Image (tube, helix red, strand yellow):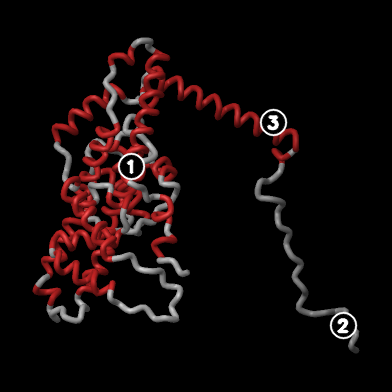
Amino acid sequence: MKRPLYESSTQYKNWRYSPERLSQIRSTMNEAAVGVIRKTFEAYEPGSSSNVSFVNAHEEHLLVTFYVHKISQLCGHFRFPEEVEATATSYLKRFYLKNTVMDWHPKSVMLTALFLATKTTNNPISLDVYASHIPNTVASDVLNLEFLVAQSLAFEFAVWHTHRALWGIWLDIQNLPDSPPDISKTQGSIYDSALIHVRAARLTDAEFIYTPSQIALACISLTAPDLAKKWLESKENMPVPENRTDIPPRPSATTLFASIEAIKSIITNAGKVPDVEAVREVDRRLRTCKNPEKVVGTKAYLARKAEAEKKAEEKKNKKAEIQKATGAADTDPFGDPLSEPVKPGLVDYDDDDD
């Protein structure tokens, strides 16, 4: 049976979770990070971890959500298109399903995620220009985390967005049998209002749980529930040719309506910018519980740096020894030089025809 195109995407295969699974991932990662950081504190200053107030999983998520909102503000400043904003948002949220804010602060990751999104969506901007428009930021601040972000995304840069699904549904609504011919002009505010809900949905976990088209329909339903219901019913009543056995069966309207209502609830309850004072409190505590191995100048940072340099030197020496033993050091890594082909003469002096 032919599967929908979306189900062949890496987003469908690798970035979809249940609400319970999302909560478990964040809690487990937070507990593991606290354990590692506590041991690091104790290794260099015994007893120091007892005075540290570590952030919990909920507070980590709060901080990340705040910087998702900051992406929107930056995109407005640079006048980036909707595609860049939506992609950068997804990158940031996915990154923190693999990493903790106690290792990498969302402010730094946000800048890298946004710059990476400009490239993967084919909306490039000069790195120097980008960094110059952000206070207290230099080009290296952006580039230093780029590989880490890409690696955390498993190099899966393609994102299926809700705003695209919304536009597709809106065009389809205009083609319903009983839709007025000028619906795009007389009721254009429906689309604009739904797009506002789409942007609010980026502050939630909806994209990890539901498909872009489901979220888009829920956003229309928040604005014009009757219109959304009419469109959904038109799809349910659409006949399927008997010879098209490759088309998968449609879910029941009851199932779809239940999903739409659940998404609407998520957007209404969680699609809000976090309280600034609450975020400041989390950020203040984060300064004291940040992994000391990531803080430049600390004993843990210097020790880890020295260890990394030692390993790199050992690897380099080992490679040199292998090359010396095999005689590869004196050979050209690109292979032997190409010899000039012998060009045939213009006159064949050995012609025996005469």
Q: Is residue 255 above or below residue 63?
A: below
Assess whether mark 1 and mark 2 are in contact (beta carbons under 8 angstroms): no
**What's the amino acid at mark 3?**
Glu
Disc 3 to disc 2, C-alpha distance? 58 Å
**What's the amino acid at mark 2?**
Asp
Give whichever of 139, 207 is nearer the camera: 207
Left of 344 or right of it: where is 148? left
Quarter placement of the C terminus: bottom right
The secondary structure type at the circle numbered 3 is helix
Few, some or many C-alpha atoms within 10 Å of disc 1 (few <14, some 14-19, many ≥20)? few
Few, some or many C-alpha atoms within 10 Å of disc 3 (few <14, some 14-19, many ≥20)? some
Left of 88 or right of it: where is 303? right
The secondary structure type at the circle numbered 2 is loop
Q: Which residue is mark 1?
A: 20
Give whichever of 189, 117 is nearer the camera: 189
Q: Is residue 180 above or below residue 135?
A: below
Q: Is residue 169 above or below residue 30?
A: below
Camera-side mark, 3 or 2: 3
Few, some or many C-alpha atoms within 10 Å of disc 2 (few <14, some 14-19, many ≥20)? few
- In the rendered structure, find residue 171 and report the number of the disc placed on it: none
Camera-side mark, 1 or 3: 1
The secondary structure type at the circle numbered 1 is helix
Q: Which residue is mark 3?
A: 321
Which residue: 38% across, 69% down?
249
Which residue: 33% across, 16% down?
49
Question: Visible in this render: residue 17?
Answer: yes
Find residue 9 and report its horizontal and vertical position in percent. 42, 59
Q: Earlier in the sequence, mark 2 or mark 1?
A: 1
Find residue 244 and report its horizontal and vertical position in percent. 43, 78
Give whichever of 64, 78 is nearer the camera: 64
Location of residue 165 by image quarter: bottom left
Q: Which residue is mark 2?
A: 351
